[in-house]
Amino acid sequence: MTQHHINKLSRRQFLGASALALGGFTILPSGVLAAPGRPGANGRLTIAHIGTGGMGMTHLQNMLRFQTEGKVQIAAVCDADENRLEAAVSNAGASVAPYRDYRYIIERQDIDAVVIATPDHWHAVQTVHACESGKHVYVEKPASVTVRDGQAMVAAARANKVAVQVGAQARTAKGGWHTCRAIRNGIVGRVRKVSCWHYANPVDEKPVPDSEPSEGLDWDLWLGPLPWRPFNRRYHPANFRWVLESGGGQIRDRGAHQFSTVLWCMDADQQTSFTVEAKGTPPAKGLWDCPVDMEVIYQFKNPDWTLEWGQPGNKVGQTEFGNVFWGDNGHLILEWEGGYRPANPEAANFTLPPGGKEVYRTDEYEDFNMNHKADWFKSIREGHLRPAVDIEIGHRTATLCNLGNLSYILGRRLVWDGEKQQVIGDEQANRLLGKPQRYPYHL
């Protein structure tokens, strides 16, 4: 089916027909496109959205605002669920092209960049394919579900010279900035421990039998790289989060936010080696298998400090989750992760001492979601291709989350060599750093 024929179909006709064309694609190799990822003569980036439910709709609303400001042009939207796709078209306008399968977007040479807000298990495959076609990428957190997927994402971004921003927005939000600035400039002295508290993973108290997929959902396409499993209402749409193979629980969801902020505040993006030891309580019943309670301890060296994930942990603050920086001269609380909540007043009112160092800040927009995308645009426009949460930072953050889960699964302490990207002296653990992906939805 050619692009010409697709455009002549009605939207609903295309949605039905596109599911039949899954095998007829070739992913364009890097360098095939003419001037990929560069704004056109009017300075606008042509954008496509892959995944339009939940956070994907927030991203679409942000891009609509950028479109009114003349910074982008939204060309296409994509979702495996027809109902979400119709809602996206309704919001974006009839001029956007709807697709059920993201590979149509990958093959469009007029699209400069994509926003990926699909479920976690799709992030790596779609990001790598977008990079290989010369497109810049904004991808939701967590960056990946395995270490090997994250490595592939970094390699694809570097090889194809594109900007990949991961959606951990606290690094471009005021709360995160105030806290990072204060911690790095000694508000509590040297920090020796950072603890995170978070409420527990839920338990599937009301299991239901497998059933036919919801009307309008292409279940095979939604599963994509994952092993085949029957549709179940306790798995889809959002409950995939509570299954280890697909969602990884709170530590991979919110941990991707909190750990990103912690690494930034601790100036520890380059501390890639550590030990990790996890323990947790498995659920007693139901489809979901993420541990209900969970404690993970990471030990870093040179400089020495400890990162603790507590689920529920020690709730020092007032909100559902947050972090505490424990220093020689006291402690500083950051509610949530520094995006949706402001900094502690001590950090917000912190005065930089003589000779103190500022940290990176972008504050083009009051809305931190808008600000994070503006930072991505800036990295593209200026050509340095290293946004605030560059894919390498996102990968290292996701590695903390993924190795925490792996330590829990294996029931033992892991020693991680960040330079070699492997677990020292543990062949079984190293085999589990990646996993097979289902044909044809694979890297």
Image (cartoon, rainbow, N blue to C red):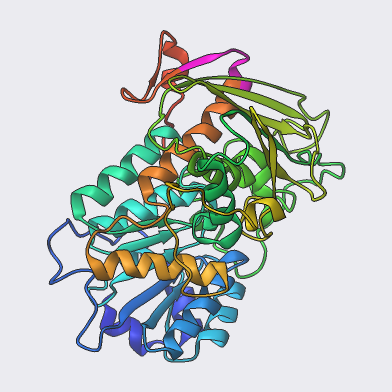
Q: Which residue is at a point 78% across and 38% down the rendered structure image?
A: 200
Given residues 228 and 338, the one toward you in this image is: 338
- Quarter of the image where one finds residue 404: top right
Q: Is residue 81 above or below residue 285?
A: below
In-image side of 268 versus 137 (left or right)? right
Q: Is residue 409 magenta?
A: yes
Magenta region: 408-415
Given residues 237 and 362, the one toward you in this image is: 362
Q: Which residue is at a point 72% across and 47% down the rendered structure image?
A: 210
In-image side of 306 versus 76 (left or right)? right
- Quarter of the image where one finds residue 69: bottom left
Q: Residue 387 location, x and y as percent?
A: 36, 57
In-image side of 14 versus 262 (left or right)? left
Q: Residue 148 location, x and y as percent?
A: 38, 34
Q: Residue 237 location, x and y as percent?
A: 66, 57
Q: Residue 157 location, x and y as percent?
A: 27, 51
